[in-house]
Image (cartoon, rainbow, N blue to C red):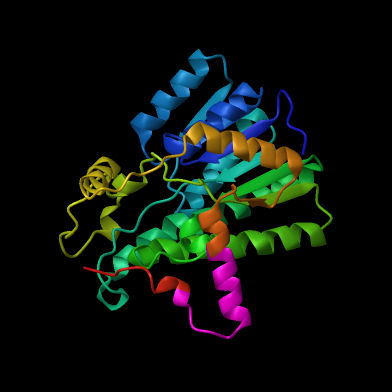
Amino acid sequence: MRLSQGQVAVVTGAASGIGLAMARRFAAEGLKVVLADVEKAALHKAADQLAQDGARVFAQTVDVGDRDSVSELADAAYETFGAVHVLCNNAGVGSGAEGRMWEHEPNDWKWAFAVNVWGVFHGIQAFVPHMIASGEPGHVVNTSSGDGGIAPLPTASVYAVTKAAVVTMTESLYAHLKAEHARVGASVLFPGPHMLRTGLWESHRNRPERYAKERPRRTPYRSLDQWEAAMKDAGHEVAFTPVEEVAAFVVDGIRAGRFWLLPASEHSDRQIRARAQSMLDRANPSYLEKFILDR
């Protein structure tokens, strides 16, 4: 898909991290941008910064887990700019689940699914019919993760399950768009190839009361900085990918019409091959056994 001046991009989870980086990159390409996020203050700060840089911006506070909230976003986007050409379903949260799966709190699953899975579906349902009906070129990017999208990290299993769902949802969307001969494409994004500095580790700051935890969290790590410091103390260096690099990768992928927005990584390739070979061999998933599931 050709990206050109005056087109419109919608990004959820746009107040920080990958979402904000994508919004900035789209604006730099000359697109109008619609920013959506559940964090009102951070969202409007991001929108003001983009506007000061010369971008045409509209921002709306949205809970992607609420179908009506996303529908209202779509109505506002079309009322403001008259069209949508790029949709990035990017909002996501970490679940906060701890321990073994049978020890998880149901609300950890409900919250993660509300945002990471239902949020993507709500975006598809609210925007894609309009994008198809316009007859103009368009593209949908759904954010997954190597954790779940490629193979699960068992210590973050709830998050992994939601991101696996995003992959199969996007594959299905791709097939449905092709069946309709639509001028709208689809991609699934695996941000990386390294760790990213986003607000995911502090997702608990936005956890709604209806999904409140029943027990206090046991983990000592309440932020990415705390976890990184612990890794360094243990002698492990952590590599990071700048979010701006991810945003550039997304723009290049949209232009190329590429479905798998999966950056080159030996680790990812090993996991993909190991999982595929395990399935072909009808063998147990030994590629997961190297993970130490200490409490």
So how many labels did they put on this image?
A: 0
Quadrant location, the C terminus:
bottom left
Q: Residue at x 45, y 20 (%)?
A: 48
Vertical placement of residue 5 versus 189, above or below: above
Q: Considering depth in this image, is 165 or 34 the residue closer to the camera?
A: 165
Q: Is residue 204 left or right of residue 86?
A: left
Main SS of the magenta segment? helix
Query: Farthest front residue?
Result: 235
Vertical placement of residue 158 versus 138, above or below: below
Vertical placement of residue 116 versus 13, above or below: below
Confirm whether the magenta stretch covers residue 179: no
Where are the magenta residues, as a range?
271-286
Percent position of residue 242, x then y: 47, 34
- Can residue 76 be seen by looking at this rendering? no
Quadrant location, the N terminus:
top right
Percent position of residue 11, x then y: 54, 39
Instruction: Determine the image quadrant of residue 86.
Output: top right
Percent position of residue 177, x then y: 76, 57
Instruction: Determine the image quadrant of residue 215.
Output: bottom left
Q: Residue at x 59, y 40 (%)?
A: 75
Q: Considering depth in this image, is 78 or 183 the residue closer to the camera?
A: 183
Query: Farthest right residue?
Result: 181
Q: Considering depth in this image, is 195 or 176 the residue closer to the camera?
A: 195
Percent position of residue 162, x then y: 46, 63
Instruction: Determine the image quadrant of residue 97.
Output: bottom left
- Can residue 249 be seen by looking at this rendering? yes
Q: Residue at x 29, y 78 (%)?
A: 102
Confirm whether the magenta stretch covers residue 276: yes
Vertical placement of residue 70 versus 218, above or below: above
